[in-house]
Image (tube, rainbow, N blue to C red):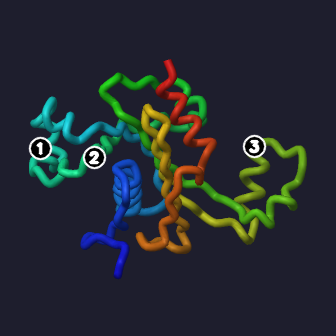
Amino acid sequence: MSNNATEGTPLAANPLTRAVLEIDEYASGLGWDQPARLFALVDTAELKAQEPALAAQLGLADEEAAAAAGALTPIEQDELPEGAPLDEFLATIAWPDVISGCALTVERLMLPPSAEAAIPEGMDDASLAAWVAAHPERQEVRMTVAVLRDGARESAVRLRAKDTPSEVLTGGGLVPGLADALSATFEA
């Protein structure tokens, strides 16, 4: 038995995981070497009730789209400012009450844990980034991280070397630093 829906998206047990996988699938369709993308997560039933024209524009007009209790609809936000450090940009965001959560998809280079011991000490950020980019064991990864106002978290991680929906790793604690930064956008 496959764990994939007919469209190729892995099945998910809860609305937040479904939203993260939907965003991951969207980002995958855009290809690699993309800028970071920010999404607001809104309650699908509320969106349909309060903004029917927008819901129709997003393809949510049919009843099946909001059938799942607590379904979330990702809405992509404007492009992130080019060159701005991600943590600094996220610190400037505040969401209105109608937004249930948010998500971010970003590409990064990562090293296996075995390579971390070899990282030279005293490097600045630019030198470290260059060292990681030149490392023979580096992996390109796309991370999609989502949080809800109530503290729920979910992540999807896709390696460029294993770029298929069945190879996407999900879990709430995969990218804790980014989840913390996204959660801070909901603090008053």
Is 163 in front, or is 172?
Answer: 172
Q: Earlier in the sequence, mark 2 or mark 1?
A: 1
| Number of the label disc, if any, that sits on residue 106 | none
According to the image, label 3 marks what residue?
125
Q: Residues within 10 Å of mark 2 (few under 14, many from 20)?
A: some
Q: Residues within 10 Å of mark 3 (few under 14, many from 20)?
A: few
Which amino acid lies under the numbered mark 1 shown in the image of this protein? Ala
- Left or right, 44 with reference to 61: right
Q: Position of residue 16 (x, y in %)?
A: 39, 48
With respect to residue 26, does 100 lie above or below? Answer: above
According to the image, label 1 marks what residue?
56
Q: Residue at x 48, y 49 (%)?
A: 154
Question: Which residue is outermost to the right?
Answer: 121
Is 79 in front, or is 52?
Answer: 52
Q: Position of residue 27 (x, y in %)?
A: 40, 57
- Left or right, 175 with reference to 5: right
Q: Earlier in the sequence, mark 1 or mark 3?
A: 1
- Left or right, 48 with reference to 16: left
Which amino acid lies under the numbered mark 3 shown in the image of this protein? Asp
Q: Residue at x 74, y 71 (%)?
A: 136
Q: Position of residue 60 (x, y in %)?
A: 16, 48
According to the image, label 2 marks what residue?
71
